[in-house]
Image (cartoon, rainbow, N blue to C red):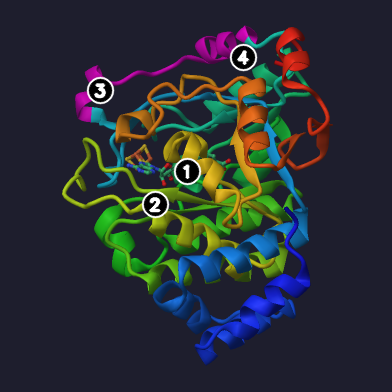
Amino acid sequence: MISSHNDIQRIVDLTTNQDLKKIGQKILHKERISFDDGIYLFENASLAYLGALANWKRESMHGNKTYFNRNFHIEPTNVCVFSCKFCSYSRLYAHKEEGWELSIDDMLNIVKKYDGQPVTEVHIVGGVHPKMNLQFFVELFKAIKAHRPELHIKAFTPVELDYIFRKANVSIEEGMKILHEAGHDSLPGGGAEIFHPEIREKICADKVNAEGWLAIHKAAHKLGMHSNATILYGHIEEYKHRVDHMERLRELQDETGGFNTFIPLKFRNKDNDMSYVNESSVIEDMKMYAVARLYMDNFPHIKAYWPMLGRQNAQLTLSFGVNDLDGTIDDTTKIYSMAGSEEQNPAMSTTQLVSLIKQVNREPVERDTVYNIIKDYSNIELEEMEANPLLN
Ligand code: V47
Ligand code: SF4
């Protein structure tokens, strides 16, 4: 499976378009591609060329390894003070009878459901509820850590954090420190959407802007916390907005080195204020992953979130630059199922996820949130996994 340098060199050399050849040569020589190169790739490169380059890059960084983790999600509330046009999930505070709101005990009970199970991470993210404040989350984190100290808490996007810090009248740095000391380990990548104001003002005008989003991740990195970044693509944005988004993230990563993973999230159009926008094709999806792998040269990992794409398309991304498939997840995640994702009740056992990865000749490796290797499954038979509850 590993594509050799000579093979890819030949593909680049045979390319008749001189501009594409130059970009290919830059990539092969591990030189950074420019903003204009990024746009040129989106507009002019064939899917085959992009795939060959992105796959070579992926394999030169990670070989055949494909990471996943064992995690579960908690969504504290779907009541939200904001009104992003693409969101199918939130209920405005005025209509909160249609929403849910979990107490600290409710959330601790969800954590306790996983007692004895080998999960390593809880992913906590939801709407921005006006009543949930900094103190509430400090207590939540302390309660989770008191119960299960080794469980990694990956929680909150800058959208929630910006709101609760402003309400508590603390600076970003102070707020992040308070949460970190209470047990907050890392930040997921959400809330980024499209940074460029031309689009952000149309799809999510009232929540934290690009500068605020980046400042919160920077403050987290300064505390030694890691984080992820996303892009919500395939709606009203143009290629230049996607590249601008990646450029801003690449610049911050040069400065801090705190990002682990870049996650392109495909826009889904069910039951939201952007339902009139068609969803992107599979070809466009694979292009997005491939250009992301090539552009984000300082991001160690590119992740495909399988519940959103569906299992087969997630398998396909593994040949277009992706080296991580998120996790086993549980069926509690609603933010995607409500937007029309492929998986209405996303849940996969470790055996299923490992089998999915092996079907496309990659090596499944379980990791923790910060990519320490927990177990390499490439030589473990699926029958053996099914028979062992700790592996399944
Ligand atoms: O920021 C909301 C997206 C994100 C829709 O860091 C939608 O490991 C598509 O960021 N169509 C939140 N996407 C989730 C997120 C995430 C998910 C998995 C793993 C990680 C990680 C982070 O969900 C939001 C927004 O971009 N979203 N509505 C929609 N209709
Ligand atoms: Fe609220 Fe997040 Fe939905 Fe925006 S995407 S409305 S911030 S829950």
Mark nearer the N terminus (4 vs 2):
4
* Residues at marks 4 and 1, CA–CA distance in whole angstroms: 31 Å
Identify the amino acid type marked 4: Val
Residue 34: percent from the left, percent from the top?
A: 56, 82
Few, some or many C-alpha atoms within 10 Å of disc 2 (few <14, some 14-19, many ≥20)?
A: some
Nearer the observer, disc 4 or disc 2? 2
View quadrant of ligand 2 = top left
The residue at which mark 4 appears reads as 111
The residue at which mark 3 appears reads as 96
Picture residue at 60% right of the left edge, 40% below the top: 325
Q: Which residues are magenta?
A: 94-113
Task: Describe the element under mark 1 as helix, strand or loop.
Answer: helix
| Magenta-span inclusion, residue 99 | yes
The residue at which mark 2 appears reads as 282
Marks 2/1 in contact by CB < 8 Å: the verdict is yes
Mark nearer the N terminus (3 vs 4):
3
In terms of image quadrants, where is residue 145? top right
Task: Describe the element under mark 2 as helix, strand or loop.
Answer: helix
Which image quadrant: the C terminus?
A: top right
